[in-house]
Amino acid sequence: NLLTIIIGNLSLLIEDKQTLTDAEFDEITTDALTAASDGAHLTRQLLLFARRQPLEPVSTNINELLYRAARLMRHTLGEQITLKITPHASSPFGLADPALLESAILNLCFNARDALLSQGLIEIVVGLDSIVSSVASVAADRSAGDYVSISVIDHGVGIPATALEHIFEPFWTTKPQGKGSGLGLSMVQGFVAQSKGFVTVSSAVGEPTIVTLNLPKCHLP
């Protein structure tokens, strides 16, 4: 569909280039550029879901990254959303691509905002977790080791059990048509898995929704 928009608008430029006004030219080129930008964004999401997006993981101070991201997110989420950051006292470092981690957290906050109907509190809590048993890690399809956790919490409507089992499926969404691609959580899961971590979700109707990103902890010398 995006390519159809691009092809259609470029065809108009070729066919009507002698008769187009400046305003018409600007409108056609803007539509084509917007569709191309949307296509690039969709491709990045699909690559993350498929775990093929090139990453640049570095040792990242998670507390500091969240404080930086919060400045942007507070403006983006709107005045009716209160964003609360709860850092971890040890100021842990996780191994991740900082830009893509910020994008994943912002994506989760957008979902939380929608669940709150654009009004309420979103909490982001940093924690630590460990998987010490190789048996437990195999059973859960997770590697044993130490993790930094980032939990995004909202007190919205909650997710019913019938929907909870589908939330990581690509293109599956409960949002109205045109309000979401259905790739947000798939992209988040793909990014975290490619970073050697895992995602957990806890929710029920009428209960808080907690989405937790678990990233490998860096052991600094």
Image: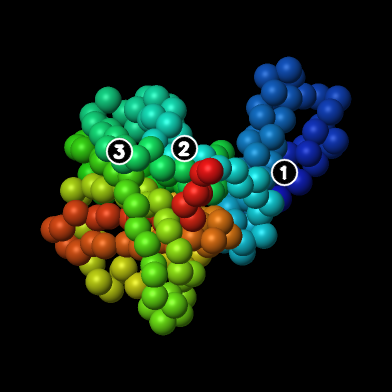
- What residue lies at 39% left-to-right and 29% top-to-bottom? 67
Assign a secondary structure to mark 3. Answer: loop
216 or 29, nearer to the observer: 216
Report the amino acid beneath label 3.
Ala
- What residue lies at 27% left-to-right and 55% top-to-bottom? 210
Q: Is residue 148 above or below residue 12?
A: below
Residue 40, by quadrant, is: top right
Residue 83, by quadrant, is: top left
Q: Which residue is mark 2?
A: 61
Residue 166: mark: none
Between disc 1 and disc 2, the foreground one is 2
Between disc 2 and disc 3, the foreground one is 3
Residue 202, by quadrant, is: bottom left
- Left/right placement of residue 98 relative to residue 167 reads right
219 or 108, nearer to the observer: 219
Assign a secondary structure to mark 2. Answer: strand
Q: Is residue 113 above or below residue 136?
A: above
Q: Is residue 149 above or below residue 119?
A: below
Residue 89: mark: 3
Mark 2 and mark 3: Cα distance apart in space: 12 Å
Mark 3 surroundings: few (<14), some (14-19) or many (≥20) residues within 10 A: few
Who comes first in sequence, dot 3 or dot 1? 1
Mark 1 and mark 2: Cα distance apart in space: 41 Å
Mark 3 and mark 1: Cα distance apart in space: 50 Å
- What residue lies at 69% left-to-right and 51% top-to-bottom? 54
Residue 42: % across, % down: 60, 51
